[in-house]
Image (cartoon, grey):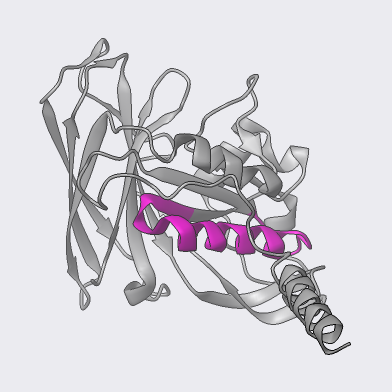
Amino acid sequence: MIMKLRLFGILMVFVALGMFSCDKIEPPYKQSGGEVGDGTTRKVLLEDYTGHTCVNCPSAAKVALELKEIYGENIILMGVHAGFFAMPQVSPFLMDLRTEAGETWDTFFGISLAGNPKGMINRTSTGGIYYYNKGEWSSKVASIIEDKAKAKLAIDVAYNNTSRKLELKVTAEFLKTLSGAAKLQVLILEDSIVGAQRNNDVNIGPPVIEDYVHRHVLRGDINGSWGEQIGSNSGETVGSVIEKTYSYDVNPEWVDKHCSIIAYLYYAAGYEIIQVEEAHLIP
């Protein structure tokens, strides 16, 4: 009898563990190869298209953060507030986190038209579709997270927190021959913006979370919605290095210690991201 009780108790422990782990990302996923910052690994940009009246968006943001816990600095997150669900509405949904770049991409790739939340993973496409549902993010990231890098990026930040003037140098070094023109996109993000959010996940909070923390929010572009071409139309050779410099005035309403710069290289034809990097205004 005692043995049966012990076996029953052990069984209940495993059942309980299963119940509490159901929100976690399940395999497939990979621990990324290569050391962080060594330039050998192709980093991944996850663009989470969201809005403060999108009830399913908090659970998608949770998936993105879980992927960040798994892959660390080899995955970079960007929350893009765009489309109908990002529009300011009646109180408490008065905040406007939309950007010109975000609206441009949302329209071009047809993301919110397909229904938020959606995410783009290094802007790879399947059958001409660039966005994925949150349940697909883990497997899509895992499929490319260990790819060898064709280029590496370095972002040098010089920021004056009195004048709010930002000076940037972005350096691209090509590790493999690149066929076709590449473009460089430079963006500014702000993390930890507190505001209202609709929600339908009881594990996250009530239907309206008035003090929701909006993470890694796109605030604007530094070199246009589509960036600019660098190098030649035919591509780049191994070892070639290209530098670009930028000046930018940081909005005084943004919390500069929560701001970061994202730079990524992508193919002009097809939009797929070659490499991405992030640097904080204030280390």
Q: Image quadrant of residue 131? A: top right
Span highlighted in magenta in the image:
50-77
Q: Is residue 273 above or below residue 84?
A: above
Residue drawn 53% across the image and 52% down it: 99
Magenta stretch encompasses residue 56: yes
Residue drawn 29% across the image and 33% down it: 149
Magenta stretch encompasses residue 150: no
Q: In the orientation shown, which residue stands out farthest toward the bottom?
A: 2
Image x and y of residue 212, in percent:
64, 77
Q: Is residue 224 visible?
A: yes
Between 40 and 270, the one lying in front of the other is 40
Numbered label tally: 0
Between 85 and 271, the one lying in front of the other is 271
Quarter of the N terminus within the rendering: bottom right
> Magenta stretch mostly in which secondary structure?
helix
Q: In the orientation shown, which residue stands out farthest toward the top?
A: 234
Residue drawn 43% across the image and 55% down it: 71
Q: Image quadrant of residue 104? A: top right
